Image (cartoon, rainbow, N blue to C red):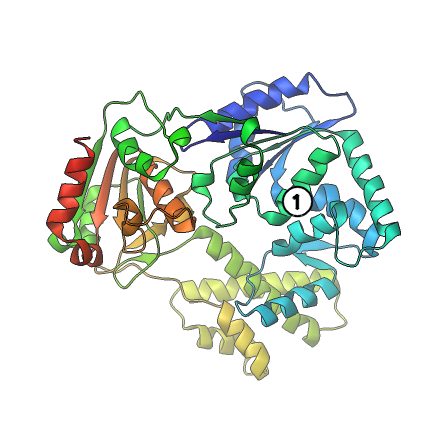
Amino acid sequence: MRITVAGAGAGKTTTMASKIVDALASIEVHQNIYCIAFTNAAVSRIKEKLAEHYAEVPSNIIVCTIHSFLYQEIISPYYFLLFGKQYERISPINLPNDPSFKNKKIRELDDRGIIHISVIPQRAKWVVVKKTGDKKEDRYVRSQLVNTIACYCGKIFVDEAQDIDDDTLAIIQALDTAGIPIELIGDPKQDLRGHESFRKLLNAHGADISYITICHRCPQKHLRISNTLVPDEEKQTSEKEEGTVNLVFESNIQPSEFIKKGNYDLVYISARNKRFETHSREDSTNNFESLNHEISEVVKQRYSKASKYLLAKLSYYLTHCMIRDVYGGVEPQNVIRQYFAGSLDRQQYAKIISTLQKPAKETAEIPIVSTIEGIKGQDGDKCLFILTTDLAPYLFRENTTENRTKNKLYVALTRSLNSLTILITLEVEKKYGNQYIRDYFAELYSE
């Protein structure tokens, strides 16, 4: 196993693509190279980089998301052999926060031959690593399955490896033990999911780690701030001497007007508050899937003799119309009344109303901005970072604990190609004082 730690803007995608091209010459003709990423956007970026090397990406280079890899290459072909169950499809619907309701929903899907996306790593681990209660024959079958995978898997690359969880880590270690060459590239400082599994892997493989410390994105002025958050071996340098860091205090501006006039490429905050609203395209997609799931359950009960195709088509149509109406300004309860005319029982109504969410609307007083999670992987020439009280202790070095919150700050500070503006919220200014904040940055740049 080989591991590369590459900070923000280090050219991870370009490095990964080059390594894949080099690896293709060393595998057997019947083997595949798998490049695993954690988002569809990352998959697209890797494919674009590979397209610079090939007129057409070879069929035995497979670039896919982690969930696609685990499902297509492990669960779909092998889960039945161990557990006697075949899944028909994957569901990304939103799950309840309450653990008991969450597990109940996962079981409901499972009974219908549907696997929820959140449990794919766990189910894949059951196939290649272990499951509680394994018998001797299960362990034998599992060893044969892993050997089969090793026959056609020439090499696995894992991009953005900081996003792996413990189940995925166990799978990677099992495949590595089986003799499959594995190479990971990632940045533990950008672990926004809080798994900390990649950091565990780094601690266990200290001698096998290489570091890329050049930053092609941010000016050195920006790195002066972000480098205060990271271990010495991960501190970055940049050849970009230009660039600006600007401090703005919310007490001196009207936020919505300031943001509009600023023409920022990216505007982001840790979490919404009373004065800044957030929205996410991913949330919208998941809300559609969640609503469609609940409507399909109602439609299936009402038209039990209809074909699966017609039920799916009707459910999709109703979901689209209801979301369209809510986004058009109709209250959710009125939308439900319009399409179901009081025919839902109390439980069905509660499930649908909870997923039929009214979108946030920007007003003159409340601007809509992105979350830090939402802008991860993006950059812009001119960025506005809204500093809140959860991140401020890490910025001012009061708290040095390695955790998800500190990682969010690092990501926030490393998005800009040129101009980074830090908007100090009212709460942060009240806690630390205007002069303390100004003095902190003045001292930082005098060091």
Q: Position of residue 166 (x, y in %)?
A: 60, 48
Q: Is residue 241 toward the left or the right of residue 411 in the image?
A: left
- Give the residue displayed 75% in from the left and 26% down from the top: 31
Q: Is residue 419 above or below residue 370?
A: above
**Residue at image mark 1:** 170
- Picture quadrant where residue 332 is located: bottom left
The one nearer the camera, 107 or 400, is: 400
SS under mark 1 = helix
For this view, does 417 lie left or right of residue 115? left
Task: Measuring from the top left, give residue 71's x and y in whole percent.
Answer: 70, 46
Question: In front here: 149 or 57?
Answer: 149
Q: Is residue 295 left or right of residue 410?
A: right
Q: Residues within 10 Å of mark 1 (few under 14, many from 20)?
A: many
Does residue 296 show up?
Answer: no
Hey, which quadrant is residue 155 in on the image? top right
Looking at the image, how many numbered discs can be counted on the residues?
1
Query: What residue is at 63 percent from the left and 64 percent from the top?
Result: 314
Q: x, y percentage for residue 440?
A: 18, 42
Q: Give, as a three-letter code, the residue at label 1.
A: Ala
- Residue 370 vs 152, above or below: the answer is below
Q: Residue at x 11, y 52 (%)?
A: 252
Q: Residue at x 13, y 55 (%)?
A: 251
